[in-house]
Amino acid sequence: MQFDLIVPTISDRAWQCLVKYALEPAHEAIFQGHSYGFRPGRGTWDAQKAIFDLLRGNYGLHKTILELDIEKCFDRIDHSALLRLTIAPQMIKGGLLRCLRAGTDPSFPNQGTPQGGVVSPLLANIALHGVETIGAHHPKWNRKVLMKTCIRYADDMVFILYPEQDPLDVLKEVDVFLKERGLKTKASKTHIVPATDGFNFLGWNFKVRSDGKLVCIPSEDNFKAFRKKVKAIVNSSNYGAKLKAIKLAPLVRGWRNYHKYCDMSGSRFSLWGMQFRAFKRFNRERKQDRYSAMALKDKAFPTVGYKQFGHVKVKGDRSPFDGDVVYWSKRNSKLYDGPTAQQLRRQHHTCGQCHLAFIEGEKVHLHHIDGDRNNWARNNRLAVHESCHDYIHMSKR
């Protein structure tokens, strides 16, 4: 089977980026607060904490989970419906239509968004905006009272329903909503289960125990995919023990960081078996003894602390474009730990060079005032913007 590979030119990418910067603030002002995918200032940990808020305590014992996935979401979005929902001047809509038609499947010229396009994730969010309000009305409560039942991350979503709500009715409403946009749900990934049976979402498995406590662990598929990658490196005959440790460290650290707000207790998620296997492989090499192999094993499997549901979720429908620089500066500072986090608190979450707040998308660097990177004294550290850090060292040349 042949596929036409469509690669946007640099000028097309630049134009899409400018359009994204123009459209994003306008749509962020109307997006729902429980939509977390491909949005500035939001991520998977916020969606995880939102599920915890809906199922914690005894709230989740009698709730039903409707898990949905949209079939070929980016490939089947109807162009006319998408442009009708987009808040933009007609000139920009005309440019968007040309971009959409240039980067889609020739078999479906009026459907889909360019794969890998800069503006495609934003357009998908625009098309799916509003699906979160389905099922938000409790059948016995005031119709004006909206409940938070849907958690959406891009085209993946779960509905956490009360016992009085019928999941099939909600599913029908979702199908009608998606049909207007040229989309449909994927039957193989649509599941209706009690919260006590557990469900998978974003690489995690959520389950409400009989005592009402919600437990979150890495999902089976996520763990198997990670274990396969680790085995491929450990069992490879092309790498020595030192190179294996170098390749394993970022993989293990990234996996543990992603799941650091899960329950990672127990031998399985502590990766004891993988570590023992790696140690035996390292110890077989002639240049290694058990002490050096143990040191390489510790280097290959760096430890990361965990705290179940310890993430602080973004408040309501807050957005980096709402003008609250203080809130977002403090929130972005919490993404760092160690000496960087300490210095950010000392500087009240502002740059030590330009004295401006740290806003979304700007990396924080730790500058050593005397130029000695081994001097970690508190009075020798300065938290600065990445651009300010570059400017400091440019001025010293």
Image (cartoon, grey):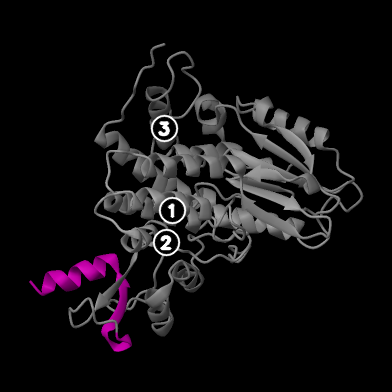
In the rendered image, residue 393 lying in the magenta stretch gets the answer yes
Q: CA distance from mark 1 to mark 3?
A: 40 Å
Q: Position of residue 335 (x, y in %)?
A: 46, 66
Secondary structure beneath label 3 = helix
The residues tagged by marks 2 and 3 sit, at their Cα atoms, a distance apart of 45 Å
Closer-to-camera residue (107/289):
289
Q: Residue furthest top?
A: 1
How would you rate the neighbour count of disc 1 (Cα within 10 Å): few for under 14, some for 14-19, many for 20 or more? many
Dot in front, 2 or 3: 2
Earlier residue among tags 2 and 1: 1
Earlier along the polypeptide chain: callout 2 or callout 3?
3
Q: Do the CB atoms of the residues marked 1 and 3 lie less than 8 Å apart?
A: no
**Residue drawn at 43 percent across, 53 percent down:** 252
Q: Which amino acid, mark 2?
A: Pro
Which mark is first along the chain, 3 or 1?
Answer: 3
Q: What whole-number distance in Å separates the C-alpha atoms at marks 2 and 1?
A: 7 Å
What is the x, y in percent for residue 224? Answer: 54, 40
Nearer the observer, 329 or 242:
242
Instruction: Identify which residue, 219 or 93, lies in the foreground.
Output: 219
Residue position marked by numbered label 1 in the rendering? 252
Which residues are the magenta region? 377-397
Which of the 4 image quarters holds residue 231? top left
Magenta residues, dominant SS class? helix
Q: Residues within 10 Å of mark 3 (few under 14, many from 20)?
A: many
User: Which residue in the protein does label 3 denote?
Assistant: 96
| Res. 135 visible in picture | no
Q: Are marks 2 and 3 in contact (CB under 8 Å)?
A: no
Residue denoted by label 2: 302
Please state if 103 lies on the left or on the right of 397 as rendered: right
205 lies above or below 115: below
Q: Which residue is nearer to you in this view: 300 or 211?
A: 300
Q: Tell which residue pokes out farthest to the bottom in this image.
A: 379
